[in-house]
Image (cartoon, grey):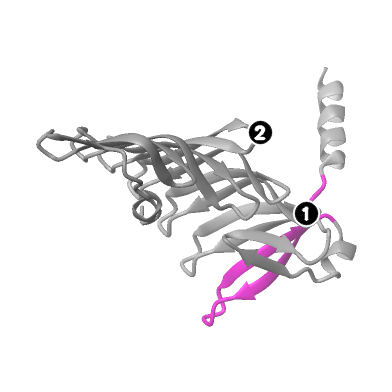
Amino acid sequence: MRYTLLLLLITLSSCKHEKLKYLQSTYPSGKPKLYYYFDSKEDADQLPIVHIKDGIGTVNKPLTFGVEYYYENGKLMVKGQYINGQTSGLWQYYYEDGVHQARSYYLNGLGKDSVYCWYPDGKLKRLLIEIDTLKHYWHGTDYFENSNKLYDYGFFMGTDDHWLMTGPWAEWFEDGKQKFRAELKSGSTIGKWQKWDSLGNLQEGDSTINVTSEFENF
């Protein structure tokens, strides 16, 4: 039995592939800022360059490697990977004190599956769930720091990670009272909408209101 266990451990150890760790950049103080993790020296020797647009990275060559960004205090800032030159897989983001800031999944540069965002105290700030993979339609809920709902909405996620607000939209005051409710198309209301003040007085209308500008400041 001991021989079998030892043989298993040796086999697993021999199959484990260690990534090659390369320091890509440092802070003026000399402390590490960015590491790349490659499967082979051949990949590392190609010296990939990552271009960031709208928060999504694209590599100038179809390479696969992991990345880790660090704060100057040594705490991990971002951890993720590029597959065939595209942002893919699980990406995790952290505040400077080490608390989780966000977690998201990507496939070929597009957001997939779900996105979680947290406040610095660890409370949930935003939750996005992919509803229709083919149409890239998502459902989102944003929260106040007291955990009450702030926004509830649907949107299409474009290829540039741009959100096109479409579908039911609801908004609340921080105390939990309803503030606004409407149906949206491309970020603007269509048809009848309802709006409440902080005292609960209701106003209704059907004029077009663009809600995107206020939402993007969240």
Residue 113 visible in the current orientation: no
Name the spot of residue 98 as percent of width and height, x first: 44, 53
Asked if residue 55 can be seen in this view, the reply is yes
Q: How far apart are marks 1 and 2 (CA)?
A: 32 Å
Total count of labels: 2
Q: Is residue 49 above or below residue 107?
A: below
User: What is the span of residues highlighted in magenta in the rendered image?
Assistant: 17-39
Q: Residue shown at 62%/38% (left/top)? A: 136
Callout 2, which amino acid? Thr
Q: Is residue 177 left or right of residue 66?
A: left
Pinpoint residue 200: horizontal percent, then vertical percent: 13, 33
Depth order, front residue of 165/56: 165
Q: Residue furthest top?
A: 1
- Where is residue 25? Give x, y as percent: 64, 74
Quarter occupied by the N terminus: top right
Q: Nearer the viewer, mark 1 or mark 2?
A: 2
Residue on which disc 1 sits: 19
State which quadrant residue 118 falls in.
top left
Q: How crowded is mark 2: few (under 14 residues within 10 Å), some or many (20 or more)?
A: few
Q: In this view, does 39 lie above or below 150?
A: below
Location of mark 2 (residue): 133
Disc on res. 116 = none
